[in-house]
Every structure is written in C-alpha cells, then in structure tokens.
Image: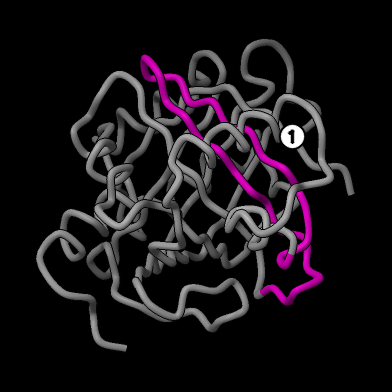
C-alpha cells in the first residue's frame, strides 16, 4: 500500500454533538466517502522530555510549535507497519512528515538504539529533531476512535480536491503502559457525547460545508489532545494510577 508521507494543510477543529454529527454526515453524503482507513482505533505515542518542554511550549500558543509521535491504526506487534511522525505548525499551517516502518524499528530509532535505513528529507528532519531534543522518551499514550472521509472522485476537483473530514470519539489518555501493542484504555479527555471534528484542507472549505457549519451554529475551537492531557492531568501532580 502506498502511504502519503508529506502533508501541508490547514486543520480546523470543532466540537460537535452526536446529533450534529449525524446531520453533518447526511450533508456530506453527496460529496464525500470513507478514506483508506475508514473507521479505525488510532493509537499514538507522544515523545517529550522529563520536564515536558514540548507540551509546555505547545500550550503557550506560539507561532511555531512541533511534536513527535509514533502512530498506528490498529493494535501493533513488532512487525506491524506504524508511522513515525514529525508534526509542525507555523502561522496556522500544519506541516507533517512521516516515515513508515515496523513497530520495533520505530521504537529503536526514536530511542537512539538504531539508525533508520530510510534516507531523504523526512528522515533527516526527524533525525535532527531527535538530536536537538536529546532526552526524549515516550511520555503519553493517546487513543481515539476515528471516522475519516475524503472527497468522492467525481467531486474531487479544484481547490476542494484534498478536503478531508475526521470525527474523533472516545479520546483516551494515559502516562503509563505506553505501547502500541497495549489495549486501549485511559482517562477521557472530552465529556461524554462530544466529538472532535477536524476539517483538513489546503485552501478554502467547500461552500456546502460552510452552510452546514452556519446552520448548525458550529464554531471553530482550539483543542490539542496532547496539550489537554498535559494541562488537565500531567501538570497537576503525580502520575495517574494504573
């Protein structure tokens, strides 16, 4: 399977109810379809220093911020394909580089135990990040159930061609048992019945989606999963019990 490895786009976030999600999906139906992952349970390992310099920098809302994570779209074993992702945001634009490799190689690379066999700009940027933040380690496990949609081929033209919509539910966090092979459990980061919707695009939002947002009185918000986990729990005191 071919994987997209470079992303440059705007990511707009909204918190919606289950009833609003149902109406949004109905409005999307003529234009959009499930992407290659469709419904999946996404697992992420976020890396940080002992004093959480990346999390603290992110919640300060700077013009530039960056984070490193390893992501899988299902429970992973050592041979499963996962993604080492370097995500940066500058002037409201998100830039993401990712490298696909086995789970065992990804953990060895990020721990500094093994050089990656991958070459090119993406691996060079991640190597620089790892060398710059010398004391990185797995800090947080974040999981959520995602539905992902892309434009239908007949509608994918012009500036809307790369427009995507995702819905994230059951967003869970923990700062122990940090492994992509582990089961999904943890502390919820959103109240029951609320869903994080993200619109991802390189240009403008399609007019039909603008009408949906307006009619539903849905407004853009700021919600960082990792930042929320740090602000609400990690920064407050000792680690959560297992």
Report x, y in % for residue 10: 47, 23
Name the residue rendered at 67%, 54% in the picture. Answer: 109
Relative vertical location of residue 238 with respect to residue 161 in this rendering, above or below: below
Figure quadrant of residue 22: bottom left
Magenta region, residue range: 76-104
Please name the colour scheme applied to the rendered image: one colour
- Name the foreground residue: 242 vs 224: 242
Question: Does the magenta segment cover residue 213?
Answer: no
Figure quadrant of residue 218: top left
Name the residue rendered at 45%, 19% in the picture. Answer: 93
Is the magenta region chiefly helix, strand or loop?
Answer: strand
- The residue identified by callout 1 is 152
Name the residue rendered at 10%, 64% in the picture. Answer: 236
- Name the foreground residue: 30 vs 92: 92
Residue farthest to the bottom, as pictured: 242
Report x, y in % for residue 111: 58, 58
Question: Callout 1: helix, strand or loop?
Answer: loop
Instruction: Decide: few, some or many residues near mark 1? Use Cα within 10 Å; few <14, some 14-19, many ≥20.
Output: some
Relative vertical location of residue 98 with respect to residue 83 in this rendering, above or below: above
Taking the image as shown, residue 180 lies to the left or right of residue 123, namely left
């Amino acid at each position: 399977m071919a994987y997209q490895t470079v992303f440059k786009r705007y990511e707009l976030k909204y918190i919606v109810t289950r009833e609003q999600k149902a109406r949004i999906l109905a409005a999307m139906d003529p234009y959009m379809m499930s992407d290659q992952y469709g419904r999946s349970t996404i697992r992420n390992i976020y890396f940080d220093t002992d004093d959480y310099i990346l999390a603290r920098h992110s919640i300060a809302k700077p013009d530039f911020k960056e984070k490193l994570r390893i992501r899988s779209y299902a429970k992973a074993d050592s041979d499963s394909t996962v993604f080492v992702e370097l995500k940066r945001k500058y002037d409201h634009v998100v830039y993401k580089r990712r490298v696909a490799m086995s789970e065992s190689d990804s953990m060895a690379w990020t721990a500094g135990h093994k050089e990656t066999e991958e070459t090119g700009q993406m691996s060079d940027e991640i190597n620089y990040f790892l060398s710059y933040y010398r004391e990185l380690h797995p800090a947080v496990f974040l999981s959520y159930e995602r539905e992902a949609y892309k434009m239908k081929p007949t509608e994918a033209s012009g500036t809307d061609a790369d427009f995507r919509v995702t819905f994230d539910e059951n967003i869970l966090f923990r700062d122990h048992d940090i492994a992509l092979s582990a089961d999904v459990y943890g502390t919820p980061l959103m109240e029951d019945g609320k869903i994080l919707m993200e619109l991802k695009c390189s240009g403008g939002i399609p007019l039909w989606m603008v009408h949906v947002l307006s009619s539903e009185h849905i407004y853009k918000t700021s919600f960082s999963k990792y930042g929320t986990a740090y602000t609400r729990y990690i920064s407050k005191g000792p680690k959560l019990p297992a």
